[in-house]
Image: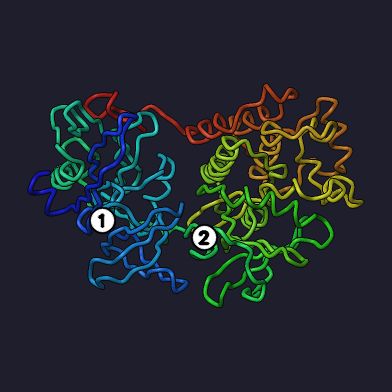
Amino acid sequence: MGNSCRKHCQAIRRLLPCGNNGTGKTEVIVIPTEQHKPTYVALYDYQARTPDELSIFAGDRMQILNSNQQNWLKARLLSPRENLEGYVPINYVAPVTDIASQPYFFRNFKRTDAERQLILPGNGVGSYLIRESESQVGNYSLSVYDGTHVKHYRIHKNDNDGYFITTRTVFPSLQELVTYYSQNADGLCCRLANPCLRNEAPLPPDLCYETADHWEIDRNSLKFLKRLGHGQFGEVWEGLWSDTISVAIKTLKTGTMKPQDFLREAQFMKNLKHPKLIQLYAVCTLEEPVYIITELMRHGSLLSYLQNDKGETIGLPQQVDIAAQVSSGMEYLERQNFIHRDLAARNVLVGENSVYKVADFGLARVFEDDAIYLARNDTKLPLKWTAPEAICDNKFSVKSDVWSFGILLYEIATYGKMPYQGMSGREAHEKVMMGYRLPQPPNCHASFYKIMLDCWKEQPENRPTFDTLQWRLEDFFEVEVSSYYDPKEFIQ
């Protein structure tokens, strides 16, 4: 062992039996010392919610002591409050050697996310971010706001680990590339100024470290503040958990499900984590009504949001963006082989900065069919959103969710109007079975309506996947643009 290793490692030597001849060999076990424990940096402020957790501020450095829990890391602060220990959410920190620790890097960001983020108030000319390339794994993309539009440039990596936008200027690191283009536009739409402003800190993966594995919580820890709405499954309230954390509380109608069935489904639902899905935090199932505790989306349902807007601020670009965000969440469910069963504008929620998330995924599985299909007042039923094969043969699939997505697009295009107006749910179903499809809404773009029609193909296998729907919506406004040096090096 060299001198440098002796400074950083301790070695324990022991004799272990080896083979059948009774001989042995010496095995050296290297135990990392403090210097070998990984160093992380805090990306956001986080206020500890339990005694086991650690409060951190953006920029704090820490050593990771334990990473056995999926979504939480046990850390010890290095500065400025040395030796304080506790658990921190994994999505609030990053290794100091990782590009994710840089203020300009946005992980899991797509081109459309970058465009949405960079035009938010506070970002000026030259605001920029770097994200992972969608089309070339291992490469990156630079997105820059020129004051009017967001331009995108592919960052290539050569065989010598050099980074470049154009081959005539190669840099040994991304940081040096950023530094250079901060001083010289050199073909970009403008010089890089400030990293793109981030939204609020991301949601922690759980209410707190203690609820990561034990997420049945005491209902007395919840305070109901304001009723946000009601629907097929029950009421939704804005509330507080432990008098500190804002949450949404869904109270499920008594007698409409078996708690044990719901718990089995909710266990899987809690593990579904995606930026466009409502995050399930905890449940109260020991008595009825059952409570579901989720993240809070202050602007309520997409249905109400559309109806209140009536086209005043939501035009075609916003409609396409809403649809693209919903399709992103549904594409994730598709990859998980998870069926929503009740996709509609009423089950999409609206947050700050035009963020839209799919809610109530999986709940329809554990409700009695009567609660869904056979209620007397069929204007409340999802028959108008449900694929023909699901109604006739109870055959739910991802492709039946695609049919419902087409109806959701109709709701978006009509600002929340009821589909098949003037018909009952049964009447609408009978007409659909005879080949009827909703007509193109007034002022609806022909390409947007074409996507609806594709979702309503009679044979489920002929309907597009959510993966296809997502890229069709994200590329809806794709146009040819002038190149930046080499057309292959510019993306839009």
> Relative to the observer, which residue lies in front, 352 or 250?
250
Asked if residue 334 can be seen in this view, the reply is: yes
- Is residue 462 shown above or below 169? above
**Label 2 to label 1: alpha-carbon separation:** 23 Å
Q: Name which residue lies at 81% across and 44% down.
A: 421
Asked if residue 297 can be seen in this view, the reply is: no
Left or right: residue 149 versus residue 295 is: left
Q: Amino acid at mark 1?
A: Thr
Q: Which residue is mark 1?
A: 39
> Relative to the observer, which residue lies in front, 124 or 201?
201
In the picture as drawn, the residue positioned furthest to the front comes out as 22
Left or right: residue 6 versus residue 432 is: left
Q: Amino acid at mark 2?
A: Asp
Q: Which is nearer the N-term, disc 2 or disc 1?
A: 1
- Is residue 113 shown above or below 244? above
Q: Position of residue 375 (x, y in %)?
A: 89, 50
Colour setting:
rainbow
> Relative to the observer, which residue lies in front, 430 or 187?
430
